[in-house]
Amino acid sequence: MSLQDDLTAVRRNLNELVRSVERLERDVARQERAAPKPPGGDGTVFVPDTPYDSTLWTDSDDEGLGARDRRAP
């Protein structure tokens, strides 16, 4: 293959890639318009700055360390 043939093939493939990306962008935009919006707007979840209640961890084991009252193998 000559250099000119290679350049022609690259241009053709690049044009095909551009068309595919444009088609994908249109499909995504169409799906975003059709998808129902979650309650609360954009789906952002706000985590409070206040500490968690320590009773959430009552009777829990430390993962990977085993139970508090037993020895590791």
Image (spheres, helix red, strand yellow):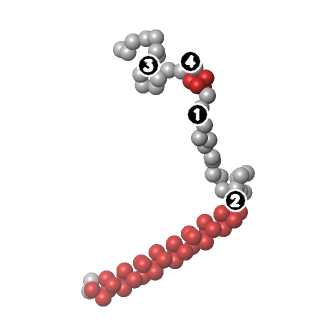
Q: Mark 3 points at which residue?
A: 66
Disc 1 marks a residue whose amino acid type is Pro
Between label 3 and label 2, give the one nearer the viewer.
3
Q: Residue at x 55, y 75 (%)?
A: 22
Query: Circle 2 sits in a helix, a strand or a loop, which is it?
Result: loop
Between label 2 and label 4, give the one nearer the viewer.
4
Disc 3 marks a residue whose amino acid type is Gly
Bin the neighbour count of mark 3 within 10 Å (Cα to Cα): few under 14, some 14-19, many 20 and up: few
- Residue 66: give x, y in percent of width and height: 44, 19
Q: Earlier in the sequence, mark 2 or mark 4?
A: 2
Q: Residue furthest bottom?
A: 4
- Residue 14: give x, y in percent of width and height: 42, 78
Question: What is the spatial separation of the Cα atoms under label 1 and label 2, in whole angstroms?
Answer: 35 Å
Query: Circle 4 sits in a helix, a strand or a loop, which is it?
Result: loop
Quadrant where the C terminus sits is: top left
Query: Horizontal placement of 65 versus 56: left or right?
Result: left
Q: Name the residue under label 1.
A: 51
Vertical arrangement, residue 57 with respect to residue 27, above or below: above
